[in-house]
Image (tube, rainbow, N blue to C red):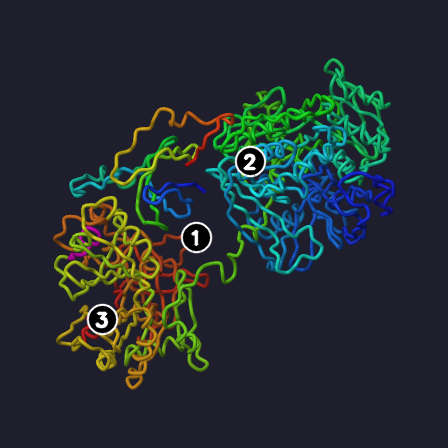
Amino acid sequence: MNSPAHDSGAAPGNLRTPSGGRIDRSQRLRFQFDGRSYEGVAGDTLASALLANGVHLTGRSFKYHRPRGILAAGSEEPSALVTISRDAARVTPNLRATQVELYDGLIAESQNRWPSLQRDVGRINDWLSSFFPAGFYYKTFMWPRKAWKALYEPVIRRAAGLGRAPVHADPDRYAQRYAHCDVLVVGAGPAGIAAALAAADSGARVVLCDETAEFGGSLLSDTASTIEGLSAIAWVEQSIAALAKNNRVTLLARTTAFGYFPHNLLGLNQRLTDHVARPALDQPRERLWQVRARSVVLATGAIDRPLVFPGNDRPGILLAGAAHTYLNRYGVRVGARVVVVTSGDDAYQAALDLKAAGVDIAAIADLRTEVAGALPEAARRAGIEVLPDSTVLGTEGDLRVTAINLGRVQGGAVQSGRHIACDTVLMSGGYTPSVHLFSQSRGRLTWSPDLNAFVPGASAECERSTGACRGIYDLAQVLDDGAAAGAAAAPEPTHAQRRFKVDALKRNSSGYLGALPQSSSTGGDKSFVDWQHDVTTRDLGLATREGFQSIEHVKRHTTTGMATDQGKTSNLNAMAIVAKSLKVSIPQVGLTTFRPPYTPVTFGSFAGISRGDLFDPVRSTPTHAWAQARGAVFENVGLWKRARYFPRGGEDMHAAVARECRAVRTACGIFDASTLGKIEVVGPDAAEFMNRLYINSWSSLGVGRSRYGILLREDGFIYDDGVVARTGTDRFHVTTTTGGAPRVLALMEDYRQTEWPELKVWLTSTTEQWSVIAVQGPQARQVLETLVEGIDISAAAWPHMSVGRGRICGVPMLLFRVSFSGELGFEVNVPADFGLSVWEALYVAGLPHGITAYGTESMHVLRAEKGYIIVGQDTDGTLTPDDAGLSWAIGKNKADFVGKRSLERASMKSPDRKQLVGLRTKNPSIVLDEGAQVAAKPGQKPPMELIGHVTSSYASSVLGHSVALAVIAGGRARTGQTLYVPMPEGDLEVEVTSPVFYDPTGARING
Amino acid sequence: MLLIVCPYCGKRPELEFTYGGQAHLVRPARPSELDDQAWAEFLYMRANTKGVYAERWRHARGCGRFFNALRDTTTDHFLAFYRTGEPRPTLPAQLEPSDRPSSATPGERGT
């Protein structure tokens, strides 16, 4: 049967109370829900506005697509999840309707239903539910394997689930800031406000934050109590006004403390514009606060615990505390005829207030045998029928509850009881303290049998929990406890202990855990434990019967406590049911781990400004603008932008690279190598330091000479390489790979500071001090000769690997005769500020010699033709110098260097190790894929026997065939053999060659 | 994010530091004299302590210096910071990790 209120769509006008609450009835706000227009008022949440319009049905459940309504009034809401959209890009799914503040023009949509919320075909899952027990997807959809990707997963994903992620980039801005304070108070209910007042009194710097729009917490819906002779609301207003006047206090509303990180760093997510109808364009949407607090006061309150009984999920069934809040804070009656089911006194206050507002309270079904005390007596006096020894056997209704079937527990047996027609059921199983942040801080939880809840035990950080989050529910005690916590948290504790005069009815807040008693014959409807993930008592029972005993395993198998609400309303009931099923005590079962975030936080908030161009810093070389002006195509190498090639006319990369390579091989090329890492190693012990670190011998290297150096890790594998020049008896200019500079310097510093502090040596990063211009090719000397002053660079006077200081274009220069191309080559080092002008001068001087600018792609082709490795591309952290064909570089007479001892292990000398070789494809035009696997035998089917992989592969226009480097098991002994590269189209035949394809004698380099 | 006290610069947030692994491992003076087993012990074997752990940090985005710290791996609280080359400090009994502050005990932890 459908709810008349929803089907007609017309709001029964009597659901909004005539006065009272924290709303402004004169400010009417229009909004849409699922395409239908409604009206709310200023101060409403989407949930309160929907309820004021008689709308309880707000969504379909995750798995069974059962109709679901609004359960709660705060961030714990598991069911009423909606998508809010401002435009095509500003779409936020999975927001809790209870936290969405209403603004004029708000557009909300329900989720997980098709074709409409009222008629949803997925509902069939509910009738077929015996096929979908806990963990059904692990059991049912096993075979055939291929169907997972094509069929099962897409279908299950579409049918199950929450909202859809937005498809456009987020256009909003997000801000971030750091803050420090003496006392951070999380939660501005009675305990938090009292704590903030006490801490502020002592002069402490205080931050008080609350996830809701208005400070006050439970006091905002408390119309019965008085504090210091004031109404609860008036006391809140007075207290907040006092705090706001104190310039050492920061008040943050709409700010969720979502994470508690080590050493009292808390993450706060402040929502700045989500409640505004038309936000200013320049205003950030959210602000992420990272607050480092000297001490933290957690006043996070407690969450109403639902009751677990058959059919407890129908729209119109709410937490009693939520109904109380909707009435007193939002002026909304949640229904016309209400049955209250409760295990304690707190729901009586809700019943009394609702009755006073004109709502028919059909009965209060109390789970207790003894129902006495001030509040139950007040209810009886008000003419409300109280039924002790009650249980609930079921509910009726489709899109809204229409009746409840109560039961009576007598002598342990359950008998059927009253059938009561109603449009609303309120339930109260006591409170669950919100210990999430406390637990995140690694504080230890202890089980309180009196409260039927976990409460904070020993703290791990400088932290105090206060009020309801540590199981104190009586208002007078809460305020005193809060004040004591705030005073103690302040750096200079005040001795004047605040005590508050409170007038409130005493209440017995006994909690209930687990499923309500049922007669064994009750087959009937599902009893939900986790509303958001559709986990029932049966699922938990099945999981324990299947052998899951750890609560962490039960959680993952049944998915209880997962998803966006992280089980705020369900965890304790689930744990109690598992404990009962396993016949162990609740502390033995334990709780699953609480992790950040407390409630979902947008990715934008974490990203802040670090997106797009600001995602990472950009490093550019001195010739960047020159290359840009000539149409260079750039690539990212680490944070560097490097010119990859310089296309002319309509050239593609292949044509441009072929032209650039030909120019280097036949005339002259110019290349910006400034990104090479550079470290100056200086001191009387510089040579000794280099000897201990690098595999090479440095004592024999004369001043004015350079050498190809290799650095290993202590485990014997190649870590970095580069040319090292001796520029003085006590000075080395060490170059590293572009990406390796920071880690090489860190490794050097590690040994210098911690292993060999006795060595007199100093290390300085000079990467960005030098601009490095490589001039390579048979004409390179002619180009340089006209500009270089102070060095005789003739072939006879200045052989390969010479280094010297001189001047170029009047600028001080460190000149290298080195080559990474295999041609006669020089590298001109000048102070970075002169890099561009020297480059331009060299380019002009080179034009008559056919000088051609080339980029990193050509550099790669040229070096691969020569078999020069790139550390990190041709090596992967498992290659020794010998594997890479570089054992010639090891200093023969050195007793020790970093990694030497590891090279002596037997496995490091095995002839079957992967070794660097060249590969030539039988078809010269085929360029192998880098990373392609290599097999010794052709025509294999998976799983194949593979002996290595391709590390570098390029088309070589100079050689007229492709060239590839590869690491192959026992590779050097296979020279001349045919191997196979298995590809989807079939095997490619390759021949094993030397890695040096071009000029194997090195005649050109010495030219 | 941890708060770390560099012995040279003072208290700084963790993002200024890089982690350096277990402290007080000394590279053998003559590795060639070690057999494979002994060398592997030095190279690969590390303590996996639950409790007080001596570890290295480097103030990489600061002074660049390596130093050592004692950290309780169960709470992430630091118990001491000291310079490279200095011996591991002996902890006063009241700083042992079993003594955790209760919520009723004021006093700053986690520095």
| Residue A199 in the figure: left or right of residue B91 | right
Residue density around tag 3, few if under 14, some if 14–19, many if 20 or more, within 10 Å: many
Q: In this image, A879 relative to A346: left or right?
A: left
- Residue A68: x %, y % from top left: 74, 40
Q: Position of residue A404 (x, y in %)?
A: 81, 29
Q: Where is residue A640 in the image (x, y as percent from the top left)?
A: 39, 64
Mark 3 chain: A
Query: Is B11 or A669 nearer to us in this picture?
Result: B11
Label 2 crowd (10 A; few <14 / some 14-19 / many >=20): many
CB under 8 Å between discs 2 and 1: no
Q: Are marks 3 and 1 in contact (CB under 8 Å)?
A: no
Inter-mark Cα distance, 2 to 3 = 61 Å
Q: Which of A682 and A938 is in front in this view?
A: A682
- Identify the amino acid type marked 2: Leu
Asked if one can make out residue A119 in the rendered structure from this viewpoint, the answer is no
Q: How far apart are marks 2 and 1 (CA)?
A: 50 Å
Q: Foreground residue, A396 or A78?
A: A78
**Residue A170 higher or lower than A184, as above or below:** below
Q: Is mark 2 on a helix, strand or loop?
A: helix
Q: What element carries label 1?
A: loop
Chain for disc number 2: A
Residue located farthest toward the top when viewing the structure as drawn: A411
Image point (70%, 29%), residue name: A227
- The mark that comes first in sequence, 2 or 3, is 2
* Mark identifier at residue A942: 1
Q: Is residue A165 above or below residue A922?
A: above
Region of the chain picked out in magenta, as a range = A691-698
Q: Mark 3 points at which residue?
A: A815
Principal SS element in the magenta part? loop
Q: Does B45 lie within the magenta span?
A: no
Residue to which mark 2 is pinned? A437
